[in-house]
Image (cartoon, coloured by chain):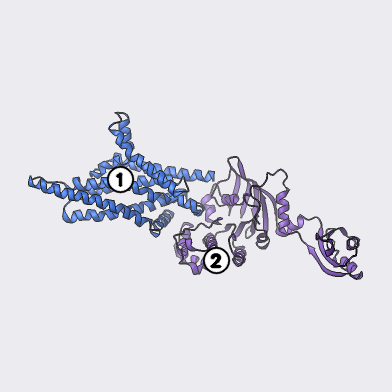
């Protein structure tokens, strides 16, 4: 446990020392703000119209859900930037030799890196809470669905990180790692698009595989164990394969 | 302290280390000598638990590196060929991180880091980022990292590579001062380094151990007879014949390409000192004795001799750079 914290701490420090973390957070906050602005102004316009007919609109339904769903896609684009360097950089610079000859286990190293990257991701999400805070100042959204949405974002991000770690562990070139990670994430996203057209057997499978599809319920404020299990198993699977990849690298030298 | 038995490492069809066995006693400095690509780094990586061996056993500080890797690693300090530094950390931050993963207790960390920085003379760079250090400082921070947790065994892969002559001398002194408390294995392809720092030498070539001994014994053992260098000022005289008649002399050969220089290499029977007789014979003839000294085979000669002896060995992929 102490070793995991030491490595996670080191990872976090290097994200923030080289300004990658700030760039990533900036890149995330900007489009998030754009989407937020779009949905809030649309909400205000339609809300006024609805009010004339005596109806009311739900902030959670109309703003938060849509903003979080868009955030999921932005995260998909940004996550490779967080994970691509994790292993690739250590291998290129030879510092992996320090880690692997220190009295720490492979699992401790992998978990340390996982939590380090997760830390940057959490910092990224924390920035979005500022926007959500505005909704609480000027409106009265329900907080429970919001919490569900953020739990979903955390789980989804964790899955991305686990897969990104795995891909980074297979190469010593972080650009290669970044590009491959991006393509894999993209495939995992668009595979869900075929759900409607693919027919009764393949359709549900593609829908199940899609990493963003599972986030839909969270954005609506529903925490379904089915989706929680999907993400948790994806994280475990990714980290397990990373451990295997690091070990096999050792044998191949 | 270190015991290596029949270690073999194969990468596919390439055999990098072939049936290597040796022992290192507590407090000893063992030099690992060989041309580039001989298998030095591979052997060291196996000892530090970085890569597993294909066959054989290795024990470090009483722990098998394959079955008890964490226990063995806790007692090993390792300086790889390229110092494993994180460019965006300062020297102090880096050593703090290393102290944590090497299991140095929190209340001892600061004192240990300060002590090690003093010892390796990097204290003046404590606040500098590792990425901005010169090669000499990188190497020394790498060394600081290796000795930080006060390990029983130190494994140093070419610790003086890339240093300037003054730094090389300082680093050798530091390494010598570490012996005793620590058992040290260091690799190098620079021969004088071995004779100056190491108590014992393992010469490795094409993944095989070709010789294990002290530097002194190695140079002596590989020589059947003793050679003396004589330079005589006697224009026109047949010096070689006179020298050859001295009792105990086996062979006289010109030491120089130019025969008129009057320099000869005189080989004598082993254990028989013919210097007195040589000097007397030269002087009584009225010739000038300019120089008379025993010639010892340098470690360089030994090295070339043992690494080129193998008849069946394929041509080395990399020639020795020494």
Local crowd size for mark 2, using a 10 Å CA cut-off: few (<14), some (14–19), many (≥20) = many
Spatial CA distance of label 1 from label 2 is 50 Å
Q: Any idea which chain is the blue one in this picture?
A: A
Residue at mark 1: A73
Please indicate, yes or no, whether residue A108 appears anywhere in the rendered image.
Answer: no
Please indicate, yes or no, whether residue A196 appears anywhere in the rendered image.
Answer: yes
> Residue at left 48%, top 48%?
A172
Q: Are marks 1 and 2 on the same chain?
A: no
Front position in the image: A139 or B48: A139
> Residue at left 16%, top 53%?
A139
Question: Subunit of mark 2?
Answer: B
Residue at mark 2: B120
Within the image, what quadrant is residue B280 found in?
Answer: bottom right
Q: Any idea which chain is the purple one in this picture?
A: B
Question: Subunit of mark 1?
Answer: A
Looking at the rendered structure, the secondary structure element under dot 1 is: helix
């Amino acid at each position: 446990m102490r070793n995991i914290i030491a490595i996670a701490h080191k990872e976090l420090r290097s994200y923030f020392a080289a300004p990658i973390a700030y760039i990533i957070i900036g890149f995330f906050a900007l489009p998030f703000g754009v989407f937020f602005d779009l949905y809030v102004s649309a909400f205000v316009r339609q809300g006024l119209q609805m009010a004339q007919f005596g109806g009311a609109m739900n902030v959670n339904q109309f703003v938060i859900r849509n903003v979080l769903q868009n955030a999921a896609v932005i995260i998909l684009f940004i996550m490779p930037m967080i994970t691509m360097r994790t292993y690739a950089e250590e291998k290129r610079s030879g510092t992996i030799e320090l880690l692997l000859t220190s009295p720490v286990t492979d699992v401790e190293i992998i978990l340390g890196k996982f939590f380090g990257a997760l830390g940057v991701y959490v910092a990224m999400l924390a920035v979005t809470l500022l926007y959500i805070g505005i909704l609480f100042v000027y409106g009265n959204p329900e907080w429970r669905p919001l919490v569900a949405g953020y739990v979903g974002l955390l789980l989804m991000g964790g899955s991305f990180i686990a897969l990104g770690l795995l891909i980074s562990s297979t190469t010593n070139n972080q650009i290669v790692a970044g590009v491959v990670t991006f393509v894999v994430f993209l495939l995992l996203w668009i595979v869900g698009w075929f759900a409607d057209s693919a027919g009764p057997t393949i359709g549900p499978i593609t829908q199940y595989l899609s990493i963003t599809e599972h986030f839909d319920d969270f954005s609506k404020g529903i925490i379904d164990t089915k989706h929680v299990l999907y993400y948790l198993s994806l994280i475990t699977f990714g980290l397990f394969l990373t451990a295997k990849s690091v070990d096999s690298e050792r044998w191949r030298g | 302290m270190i015991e290596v038995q029949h270690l073999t490492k194969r990468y596919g069809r390439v055999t990098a280390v072939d049936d290597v066995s040796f022992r290192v006693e507590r407090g000893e400095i063992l030099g690992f000598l060989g041309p580039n690509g001989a298998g030095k780094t591979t052997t060291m990586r196996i000892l530090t638990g970085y890569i597993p061996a294909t066959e054989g056993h290795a024990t470090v500080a009483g722990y098998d590196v394959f079955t008890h890797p964490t226990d063995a690693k806790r007692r090993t300090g390792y300086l790889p060929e390229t110092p494993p530094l994180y460019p965006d950390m300062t020297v102090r931050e880096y050593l703090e991180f290393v102290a944590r993963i090497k299991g140095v207790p929190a209340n001892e960390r600061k004192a240990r880091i300060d002590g090690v920085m003093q010892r390796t003379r990097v204290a003046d760079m404590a606040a500098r980022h590792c990425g901005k250090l010169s090669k000499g400082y990188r190497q020394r921070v790498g060394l600081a990292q290796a000795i930080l947790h006060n390990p029983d065994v130190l494994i140093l892969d070419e610790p003086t590579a890339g240093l300037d002559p003054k730094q090389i001398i300082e680093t050798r002194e530091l390494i010598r001062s570490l012996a005793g408390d620590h058992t040290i294995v260091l690799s190098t392809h620079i021969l004088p380094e071995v004779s100056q720092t190491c108590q014992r030498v393992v010469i490795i070539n094409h993944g095989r151990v070709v010789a294990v001994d002290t530097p002194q014994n190695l140079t002596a053992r590989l020589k059947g007879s003793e050679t003396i260098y004589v330079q005589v000022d006697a224009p026109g005289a047949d010096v070689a014949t006179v020298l050859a008649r001295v009792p105990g002399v086996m062979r006289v050969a010109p030491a120089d390409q130019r025969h008129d220089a009057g320099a000869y290499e005189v080989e004598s029977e082993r254990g028989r000192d013919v210097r007195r007789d040589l000097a007397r014979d030269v002087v009584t003839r009225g010739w000038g004795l300019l120089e008379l000294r025993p010639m010892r085979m340098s470690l360089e000669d030994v090295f070339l001799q043992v690494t080129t002896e193998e008849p069946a060995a394929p041509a080395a992929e990399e020639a020795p750079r020494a």
